[in-house]
Structure formats: C-alpha cells, structure tokens
Amino acid sequence: MNFKKLVKTINSNNINWENFDWEKLDLDWENYSRWDLSALTSEEVGKLNVLHGYWLIYGDSSRNSPVSSRPNLPFRIPKLERIDRQSQNPRGYRASALWQTASLLYDLVRLYTPLLPKGEHRLKAQIDDAGRSMVANIEEGYARPTTLEYLEFLGFAYASWAEVDGDLERIQTLGYLESKPCSNLGKPNIPTPTRECPYPPLASRKNPGKYGSLREKLREYTGRNVGAERLTYEVFKELSNKTGYLFKQTANGLRNKIIKDKKKGLGEKLEAVWRKYW
C-alpha cells in the first residue's frame, strides 16, 4: 500500500465512517504499530494515526469493547478507561432483576444449608460465603464511580455465582439434595422476581427489624412458609440458571452502552484532530 497516496486521497468530510468499507484498503490495522512509516512526513504520520483511530471506533475492532487495554496505540485516547457512571443512587441496584434474583438464590441457599450434615461444615461455609460474595460484589460494584469498575465487580460476582452453582451440583451428587425431575420453582410457589413482585418484598425493606429475617422475607414473598425440605436440586438449578443468564445480560448491556456512548465522543475528538491535518 502506498501510504502517501492513501493520506492524499481520503477526505474525512466526504466519508461516512460507520459504513466505510475498511476491507477495500487491504491493510493490517491490527498490527499498525509495526508498520514502516519511515518514508512519511510527521504530518502524513499524523493523518494515518487519525485513520487508525477511526478504524478503532468503526472498523473490525469496534466489535470489541473499547475499554480493553491497547498498549500500542499510536495516540492516547484520554481517560477512556474512566467512564462516568450514570446513576447517582448508590442503592439503585435494588431495582435490578440481577440483584433481586441473586439475593433470592442466596437466601434459599442459606435456608437449605443448615440441613447439611455437621461433618460438611466446610462445604456449608463455602457455599454460604460464595452466595454472600455474589450479592455483595453486585452491591459494591454498583457504588463504584465508573462503569469499568462496575463491570469488574460484576465479574467477581459472576465467579462467585459459578462457585455456588458448582457447589449445588456437588451437594446433589453427594446425596444431600433431593432431585425430582418434575419439580421447579412453581411447585414450592417461589416466583421469579419481577417489577410487580420484587425481592426482598417491600415490607421487609421498610421494616427489616420486624420482617427482615430470612423466613419472614420468604413468607411475605411467597405468601406461605417455605420449608427447606421442599427445595430440590431442580428448584435451585432453575433459579441459578436464571441468575447466570441475568449476569451475562447485564454485562452485555453495560458493554453495549459504553460502546454506543463513547463512539460519538471519540468520533468528535478524532474529527477535530483530522481537521488539524487537513
């Protein structure tokens, strides 16, 4: 590729970068830092740097999150890793389906684990701790000042969920958790949290001293006493699978929002740099 000819022929004012056909240039943008640009002037290198910046936003690399580190960037994208959070409410996580579903899973685990044999105290402590960590990391991450940090803590929470899910399988394999193939959340009358049916229920949130105990929360939520002996492997797996799905949906939603919000801002900055050279 004749780089001098390239920077002369491309005019940013007449290009729709979102629909630009990068393949027709037939350039290895992934290895841009290794290109030999020694024959170009500093002004021409600057123009290529801007082109590479547009490729990072609108080209093949835009399928990857722009918050991932790129140590060989030819120019710095200022503070890209520091993305301001939109929510100012540190307890806004309570309205999320992820936190509510994870909290319900944790509470059902706590309801059940006292039935484990005394000799399995380490297994009980591990799954209880993993459930607490799953919920606590969602809460702490939500209070962090940047979306990047929030995503990082969601990753910690997701890992704790995976530990809970694995421990449930081990408990069932060891014969401590009954398996009934036809059972599900509907049999013990445990609904999945929704906007109309939040978890924890409103009374336990407003008056935790009276309704905040584990059994009281579950009684208010389901309208009846929930006995640990009625919980089966299938009930736990259904709720655990829903929790894992919500983790992925939440993380993907945040990632897509970051890309959408940042493309416009980065495009404007690159446009300003482009105009400096043209």
Image (spheres, rainbow, N blue to C red):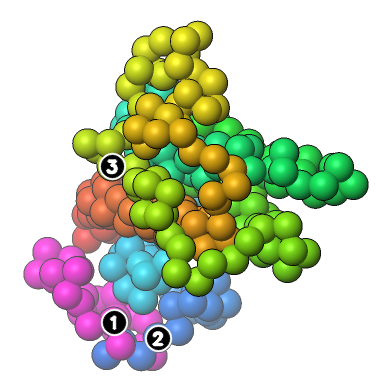
Which element type, helix, strand or loop, lies under badge 2?
loop
Work out whether residue 94 can be spotted.
no
Work out whether residue 167 can be spotted.
yes
Query: Which quadrant of the structure image shows residue 4?
Result: bottom left
Closer to the N terminus: mark 1 or mark 2? 1
Q: How many marks?
A: 3
Magenta residues span: 1-23
Q: Is residue 157 magenta?
A: no
Amino acid type at mark 1 = Trp
Q: Label 1 crowding class (10 Å Cα cut-off): few <14, some 14-19, many 20+?
A: some
69 left or right, relative to 97: right
Instruction: Say which mark, if any, is on residue 22.
Output: 1
Which element type, helix, strand or loop, lies under badge 3?
loop
Instruction: Say which mark, if any, is on residue 27.
Output: 2
Q: Report, in whole angstroms, how far the alpha carbon at label 3 lies from the one at label 1.
A: 44 Å
Residue plotted at (58% across, 61% down) = 233
